[in-house]
Image (cartoon, grey):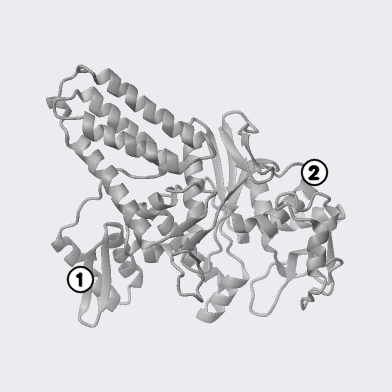
Amino acid sequence: MKIYNTLTRKKEEFVPIEEGKVSMYVCGPTVYNYIHIGNARPMIVFDTVRRYFEYKGYDVRYVSNFTDVDDKIIKEANEEGVSAQEIAEKYIAECQKDMQGMNVKPATVHPRATQEIDGMIDMISTLIEKGHAYNADGTVYFRTRSFPEYGKLSKKNIDDLEAGHRSIKVTGEEGKEDPLDFVLWKPKKEGEPFWPSPWGDGRPGWHIECSVMSKKYLGETIDIHAGGEDLIFPHHENEIAQSESCSGKPFAHYWMHNAFLNINGIKMSKSLGNFLTVRGISEHYDLQVLRLFMLSAHYRSPLNYNAELMQASAAGLERIRTAYGRLEEMNPAGMPADLQDGEQEKLDGIRAHIAKFENAMEDDFNTASALSAIFELIKDANINVQSTSSAKLRDAYIKAIDSLCSVMGIIPLKKEEMLDDEIAALIEERNAARKAKNFARADEIRDTLAAKGITLKDTREGTKWSRT
Protein backbone atom coordinates (compact mmCIF):
# COMPACT_ATOMS: atom_id res chain seq x y z
CA MET A 1 0.00 0.00 0.00
CA LYS A 2 1.46 3.35 -1.04
CA ILE A 3 0.67 6.71 0.58
CA TYR A 4 1.72 10.13 -0.69
CA ASN A 5 3.63 11.64 2.24
CA THR A 6 3.51 15.44 2.34
CA LEU A 7 6.69 15.36 4.44
CA THR A 8 8.78 13.73 1.68
CA ARG A 9 6.63 14.83 -1.31
CA LYS A 10 6.53 11.29 -2.68
CA LYS A 11 4.56 8.05 -2.48
CA GLU A 12 5.91 5.67 0.11
CA GLU A 13 5.13 2.09 1.06
CA PHE A 14 3.03 2.09 4.22
CA VAL A 15 4.81 0.36 7.09
CA PRO A 16 2.95 0.65 10.42
CA ILE A 17 4.77 1.28 13.69
CA GLU A 18 3.10 -1.79 15.15
CA GLU A 19 2.22 -4.68 12.86
CA GLY A 20 -1.51 -4.99 12.21
CA LYS A 21 -2.30 -1.63 13.83
CA VAL A 22 -2.72 1.92 12.54
CA SER A 23 -2.75 5.12 14.60
CA MET A 24 -4.39 8.10 12.87
CA TYR A 25 -4.95 11.67 14.04
CA VAL A 26 -7.20 13.89 11.90
CA CYS A 27 -7.65 17.56 12.78
CA GLY A 28 -11.34 18.21 13.47
CA PRO A 29 -13.50 21.34 13.16
CA THR A 30 -13.69 24.45 15.30
CA VAL A 31 -17.26 24.27 16.56
CA TYR A 32 -18.76 27.76 16.28
CA ASN A 33 -21.32 27.10 13.52
CA TYR A 34 -22.70 24.30 11.37
CA ILE A 35 -19.89 22.50 9.56
CA HIS A 36 -19.37 23.61 5.97
CA ILE A 37 -18.63 21.62 2.86
CA GLY A 38 -14.90 22.30 3.27
CA ASN A 39 -14.99 20.59 6.69
CA ALA A 40 -16.84 17.66 5.11
CA ARG A 41 -14.09 16.75 2.63
CA PRO A 42 -11.42 15.62 5.16
CA MET A 43 -14.10 13.97 7.28
CA ILE A 44 -15.26 11.82 4.35
CA VAL A 45 -11.81 11.26 2.82
CA PHE A 46 -10.03 10.11 5.96
CA ASP A 47 -13.04 8.11 7.17
CA THR A 48 -12.69 6.23 3.87
CA VAL A 49 -8.94 5.75 4.45
CA ARG A 50 -9.76 4.35 7.87
CA ARG A 51 -12.43 2.05 6.43
CA TYR A 52 -9.98 0.65 3.89
CA PHE A 53 -7.39 -0.10 6.55
CA GLU A 54 -10.09 -1.92 8.51
CA TYR A 55 -11.18 -3.78 5.36
CA LYS A 56 -7.57 -4.98 5.07
CA GLY A 57 -7.67 -6.28 8.63
CA TYR A 58 -5.87 -3.49 10.48
CA ASP A 59 -6.90 -2.47 13.99
CA VAL A 60 -7.30 1.30 13.53
CA ARG A 61 -7.18 3.75 16.42
CA TYR A 62 -8.66 6.91 14.92
CA VAL A 63 -8.60 10.18 16.84
CA SER A 64 -10.29 13.37 15.63
CA ASN A 65 -10.67 16.37 17.91
CA PHE A 66 -13.18 19.15 18.42
CA THR A 67 -11.60 22.59 18.90
CA ASP A 68 -14.01 23.94 21.51
CA VAL A 69 -12.12 27.05 22.68
CA ASP A 70 -11.24 29.60 20.01
CA ASP A 71 -11.68 33.28 19.10
CA LYS A 72 -14.50 32.42 16.67
CA ILE A 73 -16.40 30.49 19.36
CA ILE A 74 -15.98 33.37 21.83
CA LYS A 75 -17.18 35.90 19.22
CA GLU A 76 -20.28 33.79 18.45
CA ALA A 77 -20.99 33.37 22.18
CA ASN A 78 -20.75 37.12 22.80
CA GLU A 79 -23.08 37.84 19.87
CA GLU A 80 -25.65 35.34 21.16
CA GLY A 81 -25.23 36.36 24.81
CA VAL A 82 -24.37 32.83 25.97
CA SER A 83 -21.22 31.09 27.20
CA ALA A 84 -18.55 29.78 24.85
CA GLN A 85 -19.22 26.32 26.30
CA GLU A 86 -22.88 26.50 25.25
CA ILE A 87 -21.90 27.42 21.69
CA ALA A 88 -19.37 24.58 21.55
CA GLU A 89 -21.79 22.00 22.98
CA LYS A 90 -24.52 23.05 20.55
CA TYR A 91 -22.36 22.80 17.46
CA ILE A 92 -20.59 19.60 18.49
CA ALA A 93 -24.05 18.00 18.65
CA GLU A 94 -24.98 19.48 15.25
CA CYS A 95 -21.66 18.35 13.76
CA GLN A 96 -22.27 14.80 14.97
CA LYS A 97 -25.72 14.83 13.28
CA ASP A 98 -24.12 15.86 9.99
CA MET A 99 -21.36 13.27 10.35
CA GLN A 100 -24.01 10.60 10.88
CA GLY A 101 -25.82 11.83 7.77
CA MET A 102 -22.58 11.51 5.76
CA ASN A 103 -22.06 8.03 7.26
CA VAL A 104 -18.77 9.10 8.87
CA LYS A 105 -17.91 6.59 11.59
CA PRO A 106 -17.42 8.03 15.09
CA ALA A 107 -13.74 8.32 15.96
CA THR A 108 -12.24 5.91 18.47
CA VAL A 109 -11.86 9.07 20.58
CA HIS A 110 -13.25 12.55 19.94
CA PRO A 111 -11.21 14.63 22.42
CA ARG A 112 -12.14 18.21 23.23
CA ALA A 113 -9.47 20.82 23.78
CA THR A 114 -11.06 22.17 26.98
CA GLN A 115 -10.83 18.72 28.59
CA GLU A 116 -7.10 18.42 27.96
CA ILE A 117 -5.80 21.67 29.52
CA ASP A 118 -3.64 19.89 32.14
CA GLY A 119 -1.77 18.02 29.40
CA MET A 120 -1.18 21.29 27.55
CA ILE A 121 0.24 22.95 30.66
CA ASP A 122 2.55 19.94 31.15
CA MET A 123 3.83 20.06 27.56
CA ILE A 124 4.38 23.83 27.68
CA SER A 125 6.27 23.45 30.99
CA THR A 126 8.52 20.79 29.40
CA LEU A 127 9.20 23.05 26.40
CA ILE A 128 10.19 25.91 28.75
CA GLU A 129 12.48 23.60 30.74
CA LYS A 130 14.18 22.45 27.53
CA GLY A 131 14.71 26.01 26.32
CA HIS A 132 12.20 25.77 23.46
CA ALA A 133 9.69 28.20 24.97
CA TYR A 134 9.64 31.32 27.16
CA ASN A 135 7.19 33.34 29.23
CA ALA A 136 6.74 37.00 28.30
CA ASP A 137 4.40 38.62 30.85
CA GLY A 138 1.89 35.78 30.87
CA THR A 139 2.13 34.90 27.17
CA VAL A 140 4.21 31.80 26.47
CA TYR A 141 5.88 31.61 23.04
CA PHE A 142 7.58 28.76 21.24
CA ARG A 143 11.15 29.67 20.27
CA THR A 144 10.87 28.74 16.59
CA ARG A 145 14.57 28.93 15.80
CA SER A 146 15.29 26.43 18.59
CA PHE A 147 13.94 23.71 16.28
CA PRO A 148 16.48 23.36 13.44
CA GLU A 149 14.10 21.43 11.16
CA TYR A 150 11.37 24.08 11.19
CA GLY A 151 9.81 24.23 7.71
CA LYS A 152 10.44 20.57 6.80
CA LEU A 153 6.73 19.82 6.18
CA SER A 154 5.77 23.01 4.32
CA LYS A 155 9.20 23.32 2.64
CA LYS A 156 9.34 26.95 3.78
CA ASN A 157 12.72 28.52 4.49
CA ILE A 158 12.83 30.10 7.94
CA ASP A 159 14.98 33.03 6.74
CA ASP A 160 12.43 33.82 4.01
CA LEU A 161 9.66 33.68 6.61
CA GLU A 162 11.69 36.02 8.85
CA ALA A 163 12.07 38.55 6.01
CA GLY A 164 8.34 38.52 5.44
CA HIS A 165 7.65 39.28 9.11
CA ARG A 166 10.14 42.09 9.72
CA SER A 167 7.76 44.93 8.92
CA ILE A 168 4.85 43.43 10.83
CA LYS A 169 4.12 44.84 14.27
CA VAL A 170 1.35 43.03 16.10
CA THR A 171 -0.19 44.64 19.17
CA GLY A 172 0.45 42.58 22.29
CA GLU A 173 3.36 40.70 20.75
CA GLU A 174 6.10 43.13 21.77
CA GLY A 175 7.44 40.51 24.16
CA LYS A 176 8.45 38.15 21.34
CA GLU A 177 12.14 37.40 20.97
CA ASP A 178 11.61 36.68 17.27
CA PRO A 179 8.69 37.61 14.97
CA LEU A 180 8.34 33.91 13.99
CA ASP A 181 7.77 32.68 17.54
CA PHE A 182 4.22 31.44 18.02
CA VAL A 183 1.86 31.37 20.99
CA LEU A 184 1.54 28.36 23.29
CA TRP A 185 -0.40 30.10 26.08
CA LYS A 186 -2.22 33.44 26.05
CA PRO A 187 -3.34 35.48 29.08
CA LYS A 188 -7.04 35.87 29.81
CA LYS A 189 -9.15 38.72 28.50
CA GLU A 190 -12.38 40.09 29.93
CA GLY A 191 -15.36 37.92 28.97
CA GLU A 192 -13.27 34.97 27.76
CA PRO A 193 -12.94 31.47 29.24
CA PHE A 194 -9.69 30.86 31.12
CA TRP A 195 -7.81 28.29 33.19
CA PRO A 196 -5.14 28.73 35.88
CA SER A 197 -1.54 28.04 34.87
CA PRO A 198 2.01 28.68 36.18
CA TRP A 199 2.11 31.76 33.88
CA GLY A 200 -1.23 33.18 35.01
CA ASP A 201 -4.87 32.64 34.07
CA GLY A 202 -5.36 32.14 30.36
CA ARG A 203 -6.00 29.65 27.60
CA PRO A 204 -3.92 27.56 25.20
CA GLY A 205 -2.88 28.45 21.67
CA TRP A 206 -4.43 26.40 18.87
CA HIS A 207 -1.34 24.46 17.81
CA ILE A 208 -0.50 23.01 21.23
CA GLU A 209 -3.99 21.51 21.52
CA CYS A 210 -3.55 18.95 18.72
CA SER A 211 -0.02 18.01 19.81
CA VAL A 212 -1.25 17.18 23.29
CA MET A 213 -4.38 15.29 22.20
CA SER A 214 -2.42 13.24 19.66
CA LYS A 215 0.21 12.35 22.26
CA LYS A 216 -2.33 11.42 24.95
CA TYR A 217 -4.52 9.16 22.83
CA LEU A 218 -2.01 7.77 20.31
CA GLY A 219 1.48 8.17 21.74
CA GLU A 220 4.51 10.34 21.01
CA THR A 221 4.97 8.94 17.49
CA ILE A 222 1.97 8.05 15.31
CA ASP A 223 1.49 6.44 11.91
CA ILE A 224 -0.63 9.05 10.10
CA HIS A 225 -1.49 12.69 10.76
CA ALA A 226 -4.06 14.13 8.36
CA GLY A 227 -6.14 17.18 7.51
CA GLY A 228 -6.84 19.76 4.83
CA GLU A 229 -3.91 21.25 2.91
CA ASP A 230 -4.65 24.65 4.47
CA LEU A 231 -3.33 23.19 7.74
CA ILE A 232 0.16 22.35 6.42
CA PHE A 233 1.40 25.80 7.44
CA PRO A 234 1.43 26.99 10.09
CA HIS A 235 -0.67 24.51 12.08
CA HIS A 236 0.96 21.18 11.21
CA GLU A 237 4.42 22.75 10.92
CA ASN A 238 4.04 24.13 14.43
CA GLU A 239 2.70 20.82 15.75
CA ILE A 240 5.84 19.08 14.50
CA ALA A 241 8.13 21.71 16.03
CA GLN A 242 6.61 21.63 19.50
CA SER A 243 5.94 17.86 19.60
CA GLU A 244 9.42 16.82 18.42
CA SER A 245 11.12 19.45 20.61
CA CYS A 246 9.25 18.01 23.59
CA SER A 247 9.73 14.29 22.91
CA GLY A 248 12.90 14.16 20.83
CA LYS A 249 11.09 11.66 18.58
CA PRO A 250 9.41 11.87 15.14
CA PHE A 251 5.83 13.11 15.54
CA ALA A 252 4.22 11.28 12.59
CA HIS A 253 5.59 8.95 9.92
CA TYR A 254 3.07 9.90 7.20
CA TRP A 255 1.36 13.24 6.60
CA MET A 256 -1.76 13.22 4.40
CA HIS A 257 -3.54 16.35 3.15
CA ASN A 258 -6.65 16.74 1.02
CA ALA A 259 -6.85 19.53 -1.56
CA PHE A 260 -9.20 22.50 -1.50
CA LEU A 261 -12.83 22.48 -2.52
CA ASN A 262 -14.31 25.32 -4.60
CA ILE A 263 -17.91 26.29 -5.27
CA ASN A 264 -18.67 26.74 -8.97
CA GLY A 265 -14.97 27.33 -9.57
CA ILE A 266 -14.63 30.00 -6.86
CA LYS A 267 -13.14 29.72 -3.37
CA MET A 268 -15.91 29.44 -0.77
CA SER A 269 -16.42 32.48 1.47
CA LYS A 270 -19.27 34.11 3.36
CA SER A 271 -18.56 37.48 1.72
CA LEU A 272 -19.16 35.98 -1.75
CA GLY A 273 -22.42 34.38 -0.65
CA ASN A 274 -21.30 30.89 -1.70
CA PHE A 275 -20.80 29.51 1.80
CA LEU A 276 -22.43 26.06 1.89
CA THR A 277 -23.11 24.13 5.08
CA VAL A 278 -23.61 20.38 5.14
CA ARG A 279 -26.95 20.99 6.86
CA GLY A 280 -28.06 23.23 4.02
CA ILE A 281 -27.04 20.64 1.43
CA SER A 282 -28.98 17.97 3.34
CA GLU A 283 -32.19 19.91 2.62
CA HIS A 284 -31.70 19.26 -1.10
CA TYR A 285 -29.75 16.00 -1.30
CA ASP A 286 -29.34 12.76 0.54
CA LEU A 287 -25.92 13.22 2.20
CA GLN A 288 -24.89 9.91 0.63
CA VAL A 289 -24.86 11.91 -2.63
CA LEU A 290 -22.42 14.38 -1.05
CA ARG A 291 -20.23 11.51 0.07
CA LEU A 292 -20.20 9.95 -3.40
CA PHE A 293 -19.38 13.36 -4.90
CA MET A 294 -16.46 13.86 -2.49
CA LEU A 295 -14.99 10.48 -3.42
CA SER A 296 -15.40 11.00 -7.17
CA ALA A 297 -12.01 12.75 -7.33
CA HIS A 298 -8.64 11.84 -5.85
CA TYR A 299 -8.28 13.42 -2.42
CA ARG A 300 -5.15 15.37 -3.47
CA SER A 301 -6.96 16.91 -6.48
CA PRO A 302 -8.90 20.16 -6.14
CA LEU A 303 -12.64 19.51 -6.21
CA ASN A 304 -15.30 21.79 -7.65
CA TYR A 305 -18.82 21.67 -6.21
CA ASN A 306 -21.64 22.46 -8.60
CA ALA A 307 -25.19 21.35 -9.30
CA GLU A 308 -24.28 19.28 -12.37
CA LEU A 309 -21.70 17.20 -10.52
CA MET A 310 -24.06 16.67 -7.59
CA GLN A 311 -26.79 15.52 -9.99
CA ALA A 312 -24.31 13.10 -11.56
CA SER A 313 -23.49 11.75 -8.10
CA ALA A 314 -27.20 11.44 -7.30
CA ALA A 315 -27.67 9.43 -10.51
CA GLY A 316 -24.68 7.24 -9.60
CA LEU A 317 -26.10 6.53 -6.16
CA GLU A 318 -29.44 5.64 -7.74
CA ARG A 319 -27.68 3.19 -10.11
CA ILE A 320 -26.04 1.43 -7.18
CA ARG A 321 -29.23 1.26 -5.14
CA THR A 322 -31.44 0.14 -8.04
CA ALA A 323 -29.06 -2.70 -8.96
CA TYR A 324 -28.60 -3.76 -5.35
CA GLY A 325 -32.36 -3.59 -4.70
CA ARG A 326 -33.05 -5.82 -7.69
CA LEU A 327 -30.62 -8.46 -6.36
CA GLU A 328 -32.12 -8.25 -2.88
CA GLU A 329 -35.65 -8.73 -4.20
CA MET A 330 -34.75 -11.99 -5.93
CA ASN A 331 -35.88 -15.01 -3.94
CA PRO A 332 -32.89 -17.36 -3.59
CA ALA A 333 -35.24 -20.23 -2.74
CA GLY A 334 -36.64 -20.05 -6.28
CA MET A 335 -33.20 -20.00 -7.93
CA PRO A 336 -30.95 -22.97 -8.80
CA ALA A 337 -28.69 -23.83 -5.86
CA ASP A 338 -25.61 -24.82 -7.86
CA LEU A 339 -23.55 -22.78 -10.29
CA GLN A 340 -24.91 -22.79 -13.82
CA ASP A 341 -22.94 -23.00 -17.08
CA GLY A 342 -20.61 -20.04 -17.50
CA GLU A 343 -21.10 -18.76 -13.96
CA GLN A 344 -17.62 -19.67 -12.76
CA GLU A 345 -16.26 -17.12 -15.25
CA LYS A 346 -18.69 -14.57 -13.84
CA LEU A 347 -17.40 -15.27 -10.30
CA ASP A 348 -13.88 -14.75 -11.64
CA GLY A 349 -15.11 -11.43 -13.04
CA ILE A 350 -16.28 -10.38 -9.58
CA ARG A 351 -12.82 -11.14 -8.20
CA ALA A 352 -11.27 -9.07 -10.99
CA HIS A 353 -13.43 -6.06 -10.04
CA ILE A 354 -12.45 -6.48 -6.39
CA ALA A 355 -8.77 -6.65 -7.38
CA LYS A 356 -9.15 -3.46 -9.45
CA PHE A 357 -10.82 -1.75 -6.48
CA GLU A 358 -8.05 -2.81 -4.09
CA ASN A 359 -5.29 -1.79 -6.52
CA ALA A 360 -6.85 1.68 -6.77
CA MET A 361 -7.13 2.07 -3.01
CA GLU A 362 -3.59 0.82 -2.44
CA ASP A 363 -2.27 3.46 -4.84
CA ASP A 364 -2.64 6.40 -2.42
CA PHE A 365 -6.37 5.81 -1.94
CA ASN A 366 -7.52 6.60 -5.47
CA THR A 367 -11.23 6.61 -4.70
CA ALA A 368 -12.17 7.79 -8.20
CA SER A 369 -10.74 4.61 -9.75
CA ALA A 370 -12.13 2.53 -6.89
CA LEU A 371 -15.64 3.86 -7.60
CA SER A 372 -15.13 3.02 -11.27
CA ALA A 373 -14.54 -0.61 -10.24
CA ILE A 374 -17.78 -0.56 -8.22
CA PHE A 375 -19.78 0.75 -11.19
CA GLU A 376 -18.29 -1.93 -13.43
CA LEU A 377 -19.33 -4.52 -10.83
CA ILE A 378 -22.86 -3.02 -10.82
CA LYS A 379 -23.04 -3.17 -14.62
CA ASP A 380 -22.01 -6.85 -14.61
CA ALA A 381 -24.57 -7.64 -11.91
CA ASN A 382 -27.33 -6.11 -14.03
CA ILE A 383 -26.30 -8.20 -17.04
CA ASN A 384 -25.28 -11.47 -15.40
CA VAL A 385 -27.85 -12.10 -12.67
CA GLN A 386 -31.33 -13.10 -13.81
CA SER A 387 -34.07 -15.26 -12.27
CA THR A 388 -32.50 -18.31 -13.94
CA SER A 389 -29.09 -17.60 -12.37
CA SER A 390 -27.91 -19.54 -9.36
CA ALA A 391 -28.39 -18.27 -5.82
CA LYS A 392 -24.61 -18.58 -5.38
CA LEU A 393 -23.96 -16.05 -8.16
CA ARG A 394 -26.59 -13.64 -6.82
CA ASP A 395 -25.15 -13.90 -3.31
CA ALA A 396 -21.59 -13.35 -4.59
CA TYR A 397 -22.62 -10.08 -6.26
CA ILE A 398 -24.51 -8.91 -3.16
CA LYS A 399 -21.53 -9.71 -0.93
CA ALA A 400 -19.06 -7.91 -3.25
CA ILE A 401 -21.22 -4.79 -3.62
CA ASP A 402 -21.84 -4.70 0.13
CA SER A 403 -18.15 -5.06 0.91
CA LEU A 404 -16.82 -2.45 -1.52
CA CYS A 405 -19.58 0.07 -0.84
CA SER A 406 -18.92 -0.31 2.89
CA VAL A 407 -15.30 0.80 2.35
CA MET A 408 -16.61 3.87 0.50
CA GLY A 409 -19.17 4.50 3.24
CA ILE A 410 -21.95 4.16 0.65
CA ILE A 411 -25.18 2.48 1.79
CA PRO A 412 -26.52 0.50 -1.20
CA LEU A 413 -29.98 -0.04 0.23
CA LYS A 414 -32.66 2.44 -0.81
CA LYS A 415 -34.23 4.41 2.00
CA GLU A 416 -37.70 3.30 2.94
CA GLU A 417 -40.17 5.56 1.17
CA MET A 418 -42.41 7.58 3.46
CA LEU A 419 -46.11 7.73 2.68
CA ASP A 420 -47.75 11.13 2.28
CA ASP A 421 -49.91 10.69 5.38
CA GLU A 422 -46.83 9.82 7.49
CA ILE A 423 -45.17 13.03 6.33
CA ALA A 424 -48.29 15.07 7.07
CA ALA A 425 -48.51 13.62 10.58
CA LEU A 426 -44.88 14.50 11.31
CA ILE A 427 -45.34 18.04 9.98
CA GLU A 428 -48.41 18.45 12.20
CA GLU A 429 -46.37 17.22 15.19
CA ARG A 430 -43.55 19.63 14.27
CA ASN A 431 -45.96 22.57 14.09
CA ALA A 432 -47.30 21.66 17.53
CA ALA A 433 -43.76 21.40 18.91
CA ARG A 434 -42.86 24.84 17.52
CA LYS A 435 -46.03 26.33 19.02
CA ALA A 436 -45.07 24.83 22.39
CA LYS A 437 -41.52 26.27 21.93
CA ASN A 438 -40.13 22.72 21.92
CA PHE A 439 -37.63 23.64 19.22
CA ALA A 440 -35.42 20.62 19.89
CA ARG A 441 -38.27 18.26 18.89
CA ALA A 442 -39.17 20.46 15.91
CA ASP A 443 -35.58 20.32 14.67
CA GLU A 444 -35.46 16.57 15.26
CA ILE A 445 -38.53 16.06 13.07
CA ARG A 446 -37.06 18.26 10.31
CA ASP A 447 -33.83 16.22 10.45
CA THR A 448 -35.77 12.94 10.34
CA LEU A 449 -37.66 14.05 7.25
CA ALA A 450 -34.49 15.42 5.60
CA ALA A 451 -32.77 12.07 6.17
CA LYS A 452 -35.66 10.42 4.28
CA GLY A 453 -35.38 12.85 1.38
CA ILE A 454 -38.17 15.24 2.44
CA THR A 455 -37.46 18.98 2.31
CA LEU A 456 -39.62 21.35 4.38
CA LYS A 457 -40.26 25.00 3.61
CA ASP A 458 -42.05 27.22 6.13
CA THR A 459 -44.25 29.79 4.35
CA ARG A 460 -47.03 32.21 5.31
CA GLU A 461 -49.51 29.64 4.06
CA GLY A 462 -48.02 26.93 6.26
CA THR A 463 -45.32 24.30 5.90
CA LYS A 464 -44.81 22.95 2.39
CA TRP A 465 -42.87 19.77 1.65
CA SER A 466 -41.22 18.18 -1.37
CA ARG A 467 -39.22 15.08 -2.15
CA THR A 468 -35.57 15.66 -3.02
Q: Is residue 167 left or right of residue 335?
A: right
- Give how far apart the Cα atoms at labels 1 and 2 are: 62 Å
Nearer the camera: disc 1 or disc 2: 2
Report if the CB atoms under discs 1 and 2 are less than 8 Å apart: no
Quarter of the figure that contains the C terminus? bottom left
Amino acid under disc 1: Glu
Q: Is residue 198 visible?
A: no
Callout 2 secondary element: loop
Residue labelled with disc 2: 248
Amino acid under disc 2: Gly
Going from N to C along the chain, the mark reached first, 1 or 2, is 2
Callout 1 secondary element: helix
The residue lying at 49 percent from left, 54 percent from top is: 41
The quarter of the displayed image where residue 237 is located: bottom right
The residue lying at 34 percent from left, 68 percent from top is: 443
User: Where residue 408 appears, x then y in whole percent?
Assistant: 41, 42
- Label 2, residues with CA under 10 Å away: few <14, some 14-19, many ≥20: few
The residue lying at 47 percent from left, 36 percent from top is: 360
Query: For this rendering, which residue is in front, 57 or 178?
Result: 178
Query: For this rendering, which residue is in front, 92 or 243?
Result: 243
